[in-house]
Image (cartoon, grey):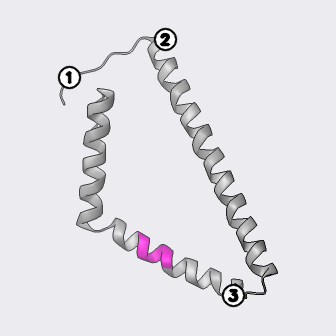
Amino acid sequence: MSDDVNLSQEELIAVLRNLSMKADFANAQLLNLGLIVEYYGEVIQEAGIDLKLDAFEDWAKARHEEIKSFANTSLAKDVAEQLKDELGKLSGIDLTE
């Protein structure tokens, strides 16, 4: 995509407002997800099931390393490149710069 896109101030403000609303929506989803996890954690503990939360930190560190390792693979880079291309097509903005 080599066409330059020139946005007026009004269009840029509209884009930024849209992105701000999307960020607010994503934050609300994260909050709700956290509440759901907390709720089910309480339900499970009330049922007498040991969640082994003391092992969570080590598990989370190991899982984080797995995710970082995947992010450095060619498959992850291909997915990121495809996503960038698709977003560029949808927005009309060259995201390669």
SS for tag 3?
loop
SS for tag 1?
loop
Of tags 3 and 1, which is closer to the observer?
3
20 relative to 68, above or below: above
Residue 15 placement (x, y as % from top left): 47, 24
Residue type beneath disc 1: Asp
Give the quadrant of residue 22: top right
**Which residues lie in the magenta part?**
63-67
Which corner quadrant holds the C terminus? top left
Q: How would you classify the magenta stretch by its main secondary structure?
A: helix
Q: How far apart are marks 3 and 1 (CA)?
A: 55 Å
Residue 28 relative to residue 95: left or right: right
Q: Residue 10 carries which label?
A: 2
Of tags 3 and 2, which is closer to the observer?
3
Q: Residue 3 carries which label?
A: 1
| Chain-order first, disc 3 or disc 1 | 1
| Chain-order first, disc 3 or disc 2 | 2
Residue type beneath disc 3: Lys
Mark 3 lies on residue: 52
In front of the other: 90 or 3? 90
| Chain-order first, disc 2 or disc 1 | 1
